[in-house]
Image: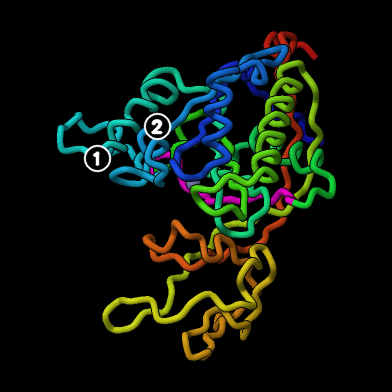
Amino acid sequence: MSSPAQWSPVSRVVIFGGTHGNEMSGVALAKHWLKDPSELHRKTFMAEACLANPLAVEQCVRYVDTDLNRCFSEAVLSSPESDKDPYEFKRARELNGKYGSGSNPFDFVLDLHNTTSNMGATLLCCSDDDILAMHMANYLQSRSGNHSMPCYNYLINIPKKDNIYLQNIGKHSLCLELGPQPHGVTRADVLTRMKELVNWALDFLDLYNQGEEFPSFETDRYRVLSRVDYPRDSTGEISAFIHSELQDKDYVPLKPGDPIFTNINGEDVFYEGGTVVYPTFINEAAYYEKKVAFVLNEKVRWKVPALKLASAADHLGSH
Ligand SMILES: [Zn+2]
């Protein structure tokens, strides 16, 4: 049996809302916790809330000049400040300075998002070896039981140095992507679910800090394979739309020959891949500009080792 992974306590935790200014669950929660942070208090630490893109929140738009959640590249963070910089470049440097490697990186980053896609409570990791985040995801999933907004483990595996997402500035991170919810709209069911998940995430970190051992487990992870654009005409205009049989079928197996798009005359386009895949971000409103109609994923079985905080005795090498 492998011994539990050895980690340090988690004391500095930040919860970002409004990374995208029109994703209203995180916006509402960050604003609430900035006014009254009492809910973020645990026995072993106190998390802090941050409104990541306040100008975009003020205008209720995804971003002002450019997508903040694509600004955390080495190139942007290390380049000198310029008057011509998009607002989000400046904001990314500020956030990195306060919470990221610009100073002493925070131990855990939670980044709160909504999607217009039917993705339930998607728990998004950017690293395939963040054991702490995987255990947190497993804890959220176990505690959720048969919730109507189920948890899915989602993996966009990017080397840390190439990662451009906000969550990457912490030592460990998880992004909560809840939907469906239209951008600019607050749905009470989605808001309540997000509040619950954040509270449970903090409970998990508190248990971990207190020395609780989390046994090894196996789980399914959805790992990104590719992104699919809409069919387009010769001028680049979208010429077909998400098929009604694909709409809202996030995480439902997509088989070769299944319909994926339909045009205004009712002519269908079929999936021509050779294997069963799992689509996500189907018809996500914010991805039209990114030329993504949906994302294709594979489902992989993942074994996660046990987790326990190293005790003082472990540090001294006693058995
Ligand atoms: Zn978002």
Q: Amino acid at mark 2?
A: Pro
Tell me if mark 2 has few (under 14), some (14-19) or many (20+) residues whose alpha carbon lies within 10 angstroms of its own. some
**Considering the image in quadrants, where does the C terminus appear?**
top right
Q: Which residues are magenta?
A: 149-163
State yes or no: discs 1 and 2 in contact (Cβ < 8 Å): no
Q: Label 1, label 2: how many angstroms apart (C-alpha)?
A: 14 Å
Q: Nearer the viewer, mark 1 or mark 2?
A: 2
**Considering the image in quadrants, where does the N terminus appear?**
top right
User: Is 148 part of what is drawn in magenta?
Assistant: no
Residue sitting at 66 percent across and 32 percent down? 198
Figure disc tally: 2
Query: On residue 54, which mark appears?
Result: 2
Residue 206 picture location, percent across and down: 72, 20
Indicate how the structure is coloured in the image.
Answer: rainbow
Would you place residue 98 above or below residue 82 in this image? above
Left or right: residue 211 versus residue 27 is: right
